[in-house]
Image (cartoon, rainbow, N blue to C red):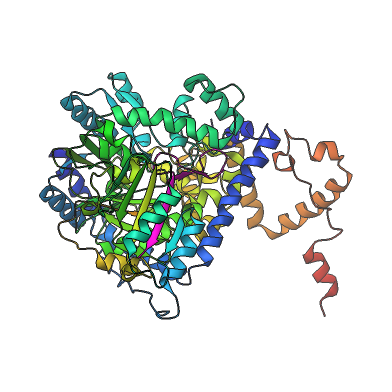
Amino acid sequence: MSHSDLAEKFNTDFDKTTWHDESLWFVRQKRDRAVFQVEEFQELRELGSQIKDHTLSKLDYYLEQFEANAQANGVVVHWAADAHEHNQIVLDIIKKSGESCLVKSKSMLTEECHLNPFLEKNGVEVVDTDLGERIIQFLDQPPSHIVMPAIHLKKEEIGEVFHKHLGTAKGMSDPQQLTEAARQHLRQKFMAAKVALSGVNFAVAETGGIVVCTNEGNADLGIDLANVHIASMGIEKVIPTLEHLAVFTRLLARSAIGQPITSYTSHFTKPRQGTQMHVVIVDNGRTAQLGRPDFRASLKCIRCGACMNTCPVYRRSGGHSYDATVPGPIGAILSPNIDLKKHSSLPFASTLCGSCSDVCPVKIDIHVQLYKWRQIVSKSGDYSASKRLAMNVLGRVLERPQIYGRIGKVARRMLQITPHALSHAAALNPWAKARELPQPPAESFKEWYGKNRK
Amino acid sequence: MLSRQKILGQIRANKPPELPSPIVPFFNENEGKINAVEKFGEVLRFVGGSFYELPAGETNPNAWLVRELKRLFPAAKSVVSSLSLGMETQTITPETDTSVLEGIDLAVLYGEIAVAENAAIWLPEAQMPHRAVPFITQYLVLVVKKESFVRNMHEAYQLIPKQNQTYGVFISGPSKTADIEQSLVIGAHGARGLTVFVV
């Protein structure tokens, strides 16, 4: 289904759509408050952008440097060309450890690789330990936001899920009580698990260490109690030095949720005495994206989610309407790289207002890339027939001023005498579904100018 | 190893021409204008932590700490500390079993660097009796020396040695989540409270 079909489904519950819209706008406002307190924030964005540009231009060098330093620290480094290879590596590590339960903190990469269903099929119990992730895992849903995975659910729905899976009292929906129930439930899992998997926010080439940012402390709790730590990272997560890391620690949480920094910014460099640490470096289409000059800047993304919170289309269509691992504006430019046919409607899920680019902490030209993807989609033919026809006709009319003038005149007349029910019929004019057309003027500007010029 | 060569080869074929690495400044023009300790306290309260400064004239910081800790955490049964306060109920080592760690009510540890702009405190493994302690304890107390305050993350990373790192974490406030309807709840998985003492 296309984005617009799925968005239409989301919009059938008007009140919930409005609530979703307002919840995310609230996060955007928190972001603004945090950002405005830092005088040099725009300079930091520029630095973040330049550091990422520089790193991508020497990506092979920094990955090799990271690998060498990590190995010197006693970390085992694996390379995976695609999702399947990544999943197989993770499974092999778990099997070799003799364990059958994995505690996981948030990792969008493992969502992208569909790691959970793969491990479950192979007899591994997977426990997502981020609260939002655990909630949607119970519901067997994908995350609808990269930072707030369960932002699409109301607390009453979550209460129902916990009642069913954790045995909390029916009707209990207080966030404090629900969080406490999850804390007790997940503590048991943390105590028992011997293998922990985390994502990677930043991999520092000069130290060979990885950095994981959480508010809950779930990544550390899982890893620090386990005997085996697996960290999965895309190739674009590497940055050169700790000086560069300073810039990103100042940008990430402010952009994401309006906090000055995440509660925990954890630097895993060497495994704990007597335990193992593995890092899996994954390509899965990223090197291809690196080869596309128009789109390679999307690899600079630090996954803060600010572009989602600000996007008028995301806020009113929900993350699931994108039907992609990463939703929202950044997802709409990343996903077509992976599967153009499946995701051909995503570059159109935008008003091109440019708000996403304005808030991006590493200055990705998101709305420009959306526009460029549209050119590629329309050329590839993955474009609805009605839209193609309309665009062709419009193109021809706009090329011919005389025809344009004549059609305009007829249209103004017609619109005045067309009954409202017909001009706003949803089947004929989807644009007018929730909008009013303007009152047609008596004459065009060209006609007015012809009369009034001196 | 096949994938390693393949990935690195594709990067070499596809990467853009080399772009310069920017010089990151320290952004310390306001040096002297900002009271780092004061700013830190302000931000810490905003992120849900509490903040106490050694009162002027107090000559025995440890005695003051113990008094305050007993006042603030009267119910704490299992107390762990790396400060030799005399109120520790047990000794934790990297070999301590999970079942013991699980019972810790209060952990009192030294923080090495305190960052004013975001109330983050650098806690390297050397200050942790076991890596899990700062997270598994119900309540965490971090003690920071007055001279350990810096203004921002640029200055903080300058003080962290690049060599011989094992594990370290910047902690800013207690464990929290807003995953349910954006309602902020303190005490997700990690410590339910963070109290910072400046000595």
Outermost residue, left side = A72
User: In the rendered view, does A328 fall on the left or right side of A399?
Assistant: left
Q: In x, y percent, where is residue B156?
A: 31, 66
What residue is rendered at 22% in x and 24% in y?
A: A99
Which image quadrant for residue A417?
A: top right
Q: Relative to residue B118, is residue A27 drawn left or right?
A: right
Q: Residue at x 46, y 68 (%)?
A: B39
Q: Quadrant of the C terminus of chain A?
A: bottom right
Q: What residue is drawn where x is 45% and y is 80%?
A: B33
The residue nearer to you, when weighing A105 against A54, is A105
The answer to whether residue B91 is left or right of residue A443 is: left
Instruction: Please report the residue visible at 39 percent of the width from the left and 55 percent of the height from the top.
Output: B67
Residue A411 location (% of width, % of height): 80, 49
Q: Quadrant of residue A153?
A: top right
Closest to the observer, A251 or A410: A251
Q: Is residue A282 magenta?
A: no
The answer to whether residue A300 is seen in the rendering is: no
* Viewer-proximal residue among A131 and A69: A131
Comparing B176 with A419, the one in front is B176
The span picked out in magenta is B175-199
Quarter assignment of residue A222: top left
- Report whether residue A425 is seen: yes
Residue A28 drawn at (x, y percent): 56, 54
Using the image, determine if residue B180 lies above or below residue A53: above
Q: How many marks?
A: 0
Dominant secondary structure, magenta: loop
| Residue B192 drawn in magenta | yes
Q: Position of residue A30 (x, y in %)?
A: 56, 56
